[in-house]
Amino acid sequence: MVFGFYPYDEHWRPALAVLLFLGAMIVSMIPRFWSQRLLWLWLTVVVACGVLMYGGLFGLSVVNTTSWGGLPLSFMLSSVGLAFGFVLGVLLALARSSKLPAIQVIAVVFIEMVRGVPLVSILFMASVMLPLFMPDGVTIDKLLRAQVAIIIFAGAYIAETVRGGLQAVPKGQHEAAAALGLGYWLSMRKIVLPQALKIVIPPLVNIFIGFFQDTTLVTIIGLLDFLDTVRSAMRDPAWQGIAVLEGYVFAALVYAVFSYGMGSYSRFIERRLKTDHSHGRSG
């Protein structure tokens, strides 16, 4: 369940990749480490995990993505998908709120088209239809196609949530930024977006939890994620009668722990960022 069909002698590589990922996640949750260095930490961890999983450098043997699976695959699809999906969602939300008609129309069409179809159909398009439009001899890795599909789908949903936060920011904040002489991008980055994102923390975390669990849908295009390894074990005669109960219970516990952890951390962030105006008046 943890390693999927990764070569047995190389199990230390996905194990180390998972430990690096969890370590970076723990560091990211500590407020005193919130700085630009955190971005470089994640870039380093992502590159290191990619090298560990794929190999080809530092004497590591190459392991194709067809052999990847289990917990490392679920972590990668969900974390990378949500990270890039968040950036895409913020850009789409700003584009949809733009006063330029062309940019606004493009953003609206993109968001509504993606949100109008289920994730399964987008995964099928990325896995089955996309190769048909590629030139002869040109192929794109199936894992990369699934990752891009998840990023696009997550970005469309995050965009609507962030747009709601932008609309909830009082108009006076925009006017105050303009009075200070701040341009559009600077006022958004320094004043408007921080307030908007603080407002939409609960729905954003709800999206994150949902997409972390929805990575199980990649099994329909032939990728063995964390949950699908249980089904693979059920088809193995050596594990029949054993993996059914224990495997599903273990998978449920893992998903429950991570989902509860994300929910608890979001409440911590809300308490940390909350401004108690009533306390200021009473003082």
Image (cartoon, helix red, strand yellow):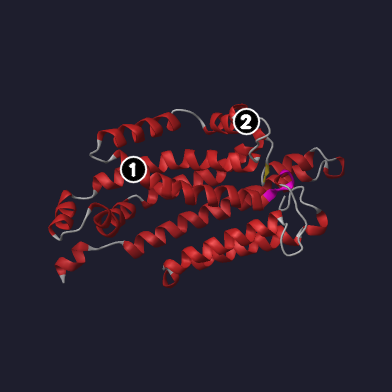
N-term-proximal mark, 1 vs 2: 1
Is residue 95 on the magenta stretch? no
Q: Provide residue 169's location: percent of width, then percent of height.
A: 23, 50
For disc 2, the marked residue is 135
Where 122 sits versus 252, above or below?
above
Q: Residue furthest right?
A: 238
Q: Residue furthest front?
A: 136
Q: Is residue 261 visible?
A: yes
- Main structural element of the magenta stretch: helix, strand or loop? helix
Q: Which residues lie in the magenta part? A: 66-70
Q: How many marks?
A: 2
Which label belongs to residue 62? none
**In the figure, is residue 161 to the left or right of 27?**
left
In the picture, which quadrant includes the C terminus? bottom left
Q: Is residue 67 magenta?
A: yes
Q: Is residue 25 visible?
A: no
In the picture of the structure, the residue carrying the numbered disc 1 is: 93
Q: Residue at x 69, y 59 (%)?
A: 52
Kindly state the secondary structure of the residue where label 2 is placed.
Answer: loop
* Amino acid type, label 2: Pro
Residue 238 shown left or right of residue 175 in the figure: right
